[in-house]
């Protein structure tokens, strides 16, 4: 029995304060798994010590263990990287077989990602097209996906910006969000705190939020107006971002196809500028 089922099963036998805590966990699981205990305490109006006793009532050592159980209950758990890495050591002499298996799983990730987003991609594109500006955020392993999405989108749309927090500037960058903007946030389990912070700030600013993530129950998905899902399975120790990158490129392809001749004109202009400034090497002369 999962944590949510346990709470529902034992709810009638709880005190009023315990029911208040249980109701918050059931109705706001996203906040419970991403916020600190003190933040939850302030939100629900129950002292931290009481939340610890509530967790212990349910058989946990404390609040962190209750959060971990809720993460598993939401299907967001991830196996520790080091544990998966140890399982690869015995395969050191089987390099070719392991590499082949990784490529095979990448193919499966791409197939799963394609099938998960057929109807959602046009909605995601429409959300971005309606925005005054588009801000893109992805941290750690998701940073290259976010950067490439921003870089390519910027070739045919000027109002695309990267939220990267460079030099500790994330708070400053988030002040630029307006309710007429859209924010794209990319993350997978275990989820980046910065990504969740960006999504929350975007919602508070009234922005439309597009999440690229690995589960419909992820903290990002629960904060988003539209969700695109990618698979992260991998025989290696680290989750695969091949699906996330493919999903980003599929979204960009759809956006440029909908941009029509004006979009093509902006791409031609950007490409000419890249060659003119020397950013790109000139094409080799024909033999």
Image (spheres, grey):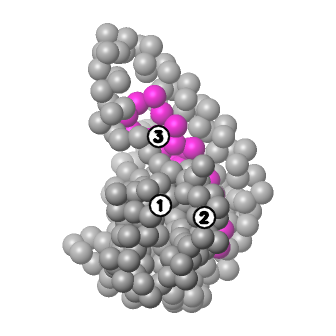
Which residue is labeled 2 in the image?
Answer: 10
Q: Residue at x 38, y 70 (%)?
A: 53
Left or right, residue 94 beside residue 261: left
> Residue extending furthest right?
119
Q: Residue at x 49, y 19 (%)?
A: 100
Which numbered mark, 3 or 1, is in the foreground of this view? 1
Q: Which residue is drawn at 36% across and 70% down?
A: 52
Label located before the other in sequence (1 or 2): 2
- Residues at marks 2 and 3 touching, judged by CB atoms closer than 8 Å: no
Residue 263 image point, x, y percent: 64, 68
Which secondary structure, mark 2? helix
Mark 2 packing: few (<14 Cα in 10 Å), some, or many (20+)? few
Residue 232: in magenta span: yes
Residue 223: in magenta span: no
Which secondary structure, mark 1? loop
- Residues at marks 1 and 2 touching, judged by CB atoms closer than 8 Å: yes
Magenta region: which residues? 224-246
Label located before the other in sequence (2 or 3): 2
**Which quarter of the figure has residue 227?**
bottom right
Task: Tell me the CA gap for discs 2 and 3.
Answer: 39 Å
Which residue is labeled 1 in the image?
Answer: 58
Which residue is labeled 3 in the image?
Answer: 240
**Which quarter of the figure has residue 66?**
bottom left
- Secondary structure of the magenta portion, mostly? loop
> Residue extending furthest top?
93
Mark 1 packing: few (<14 Cα in 10 Å), some, or many (20+)? some
Q: How many callouts does the rendering have?
A: 3
Decide: is 177 above or below 259: below
> Residue extending furthest left?
167
Label located before the other in sequence (3 or 1): 1
């Amino acid at each position: 029995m999962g944590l949510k089922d346990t709470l529902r099963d034992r709810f009638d036998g709880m005190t009023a304060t315990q029911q208040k805590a249980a109701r918050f966990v059931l109705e706001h699981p996203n906040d419970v798994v991403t916020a600190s205990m003190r933040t939850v305490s302030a939100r629900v109006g129950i002292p931290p010590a009481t939340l610890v006793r509530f967790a212990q009532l349910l058989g946990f050592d404390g609040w962190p263990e209750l959060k971990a159980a809720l993460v598993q209950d939401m299907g967001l758990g991830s196996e520790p990287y080091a544990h998966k890495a140890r399982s690869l050591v015995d395969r050191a002499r089987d390099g070719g077989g392991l590499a082949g298996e990784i490529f095979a799983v990448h193919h499966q990730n791409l197939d799963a990602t394609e099938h998960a987003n057929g109807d959602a991609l046009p909605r995601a594109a429409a959300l971005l097209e309606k925005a005054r500006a588009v801000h893109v955020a992805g941290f750690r392993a998701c940073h290259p996906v976010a950067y490439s999405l921003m870089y390519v989108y910027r070739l045919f749309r000027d109002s695309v910006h990267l939220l990267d927090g460079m030099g500790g500037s994330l708070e400053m960058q988030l002040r630029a969000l307006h309710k007429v903007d859209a924010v794209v946030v990319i993350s997978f389990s275990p989820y980046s705190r910065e990504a969740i912070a960006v999504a929350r700030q975007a919602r508070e600013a009234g922005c439309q939020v597009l999440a690229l993530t690995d589960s419909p129950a992820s903290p990002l998905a629960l904060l988003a107006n539209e969700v695109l899902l990618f698979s992260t399975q991998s025989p290696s120790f680290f989750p695969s971002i091949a699906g996330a990158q493919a999903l980003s490129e599929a979204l960009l392809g759809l956006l440029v196809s909908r941009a029509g001749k004006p979009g093509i004109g902006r791409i031609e202009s950007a490409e000419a500028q890249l060659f003119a400034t020397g950013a790109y090497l000139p094409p080799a002369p024909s033999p």
